[in-house]
Each structure stands twice: as structure tokens, then as C-alpha cells.
Image (cartoon, grey):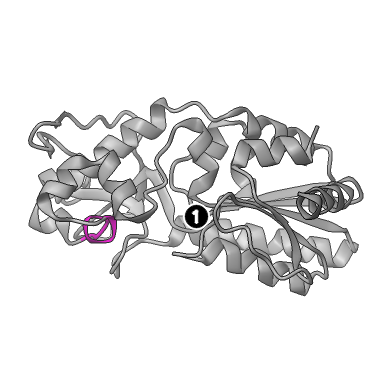
Amino acid sequence: MKEKQHAIEEAKKLLRHSDALLITAGAGMGVDSGLPDFRGNEGFWRAYPVARKLGLSFVELANPHWFDANPALAWAFYGHRLHLYRETVPHPGFAVLLDAAKKKEEYFVFTSNVDGQFQKAGYDEERIVECHGSIHHLQCTQCHAGIWSAKGVNIPIDMESFKATEWPHCPRCGATARPNILMFGDWTWDSSRTDAQQKRFEDFLQRLYVKKLKLAIVEIGAGTAVPTVRLTGERIARELNTKLIRINPREPQINPSLGYSVPMGGLEGIKALIA
């Protein structure tokens, strides 16, 4: 308990004395908003019991080949998630973090989440990297039509059979559309939107370096199964000679030379750091 409290106090000092804030977030960031984090097959199957019946894991179902092999199944899964993310209200921790970020000279968000919750919570669209893409944008499964918004797209789903009865098509060639999300085994993801976000992120990091701004990094709910978020934050902490604050109830471990471990859920941890 003493060790945890000491880490929180040191993390609070880092936040107070920083000029810039980088927020990095994985699936655990959405848990307090009521979103599933698909941790392990059991967690995924609780959210999608039909997938258990079909013997499909999250990794197997989150694969682009279903949009060709069985678009009704693919769009049942992604259409349900699209509707879920649209209806979900970001938990209060988003607003607490945003308020802290706006008080800094610079801030940015790096997230593997495809749910658009940071934008919904009021974060500047130009200050967000969605490294795995976004469910709120679509692309074609066949041609190079670019990326377009999923706004106004609604997917009727028969939840008993877990099949979509309608789904979006490419406005250019008429083929089945798919979410602009980097899936498992995905060689056809159009990364152009994320590439543009990444360029703005690199410009942000360059400004910190040139202006010699002191950066604080707060990581929330980023696991080790797909460690992109964790590794990105750790790399930046090393490069900019700062510390990373890792908020994670199950995998809070971090080398003390790299940062502080806060073994809490997202909302609880954010409140503990920012009163």
C-alpha cells in the first residue's frame, strides 16, 4: 500500500510540473464507460455468446476475410460494435483528463481504441492518433475508393442468428464495405487516415523537443497482449527523458527507471492522480 501511494504522489508531482501531456490508452480506458475489453476468449464470449457457439475467438472473428466469406457475420459483429460505441457515453475520467490537458501548453492522445470515445468526450480531432483506425470510418474491400465516414450508416442485425440483414457498400464500385480498422491478418487496411494522424503526432513530439517542454505521459488500460500502446509510451519516455504513469488494474508492472505503477482501473486511477 505504501509503495502504491508513493507512486501516486510521485506521479502527481510529475503531472503538476509538466508543460505537456501525452495520454496513451488501450481497451481498459473504456471499461468504466461499460465497454467490453475482450480480454481473453471468455471475456469476448461473454460479450458475444454466438461467437462461442461458432467456436470463434476474437482474433479469428476480427479478420477481414469474413467480409468476403460471410459479410452477414462480419457486419453483425462490427455493426453491433458501431452501434454500441455510438450509444456509449464516455466516463467522467475523460473530462478530468481533458481539463488537465487543456491547462498544458501542448497535449496529444495516442490510442489503440477504435471507438471514437476521445472525440465524443471533446478532445481535439487534430490531437488524436488512432493507431488501429476507427470504426466510424469505412473503406472498400475491393477497390481503392479511399476512406469515408460511417455517419448515418445503420446495420440491422438479427441477434438470434447473429447476422446482419443489410450492410454498407462502396459508393464507387458497389462491393462490400468494411470498417477502416486494422484487423488481424489484415493486408488491405487503408492506413492513410492514421498516417496523417501519425504525422501530426510526430510534429507534436518535435515541438516538445525544440521548445524543451517537460512531458508527462499517462497510460490507461493498455495491456500486453497487443503491446503497441505500452511500447510507444515507453519509447517516448526514454527519448524525451521523462516518466510514464501506468494505470492498469491487472498489468501495472513497469521498470521503475521508466515510470510509476498505479494498479487501479482507469477512472479510479485518473481521479487518484488529478483531484
Up/down of 134 relative to 60, above or below: above
Task: Read off the residue under disc 1.
Answer: 112
Q: Secondary structure at mark 1?
A: loop
**Is 127 a magenta residue?**
no
Q: How many marks?
A: 1
Give percent across and percent down for residue 238: 75, 73
Where the C terminus falls, by quadrant?
A: top right
Magenta part of the chain? 58-64
What's the amino acid at mark 1?
A: Ser
Is any atom of residue 44 visible in this view? yes
**Is 63 a magenta residue?**
yes
Question: Quick check: 54 left or right of 40?
Answer: left
Please report the residue visible at 42 percent of the width from the left and 36 percent of the height from the top.
Answer: 35
Is any atom of residue 169 visible in this view? no
Question: Quick check: 137 left or right of 118?
Answer: left
Outermost residue toward the front? Answer: 1
Give percent across and percent down for residue 117: 51, 37
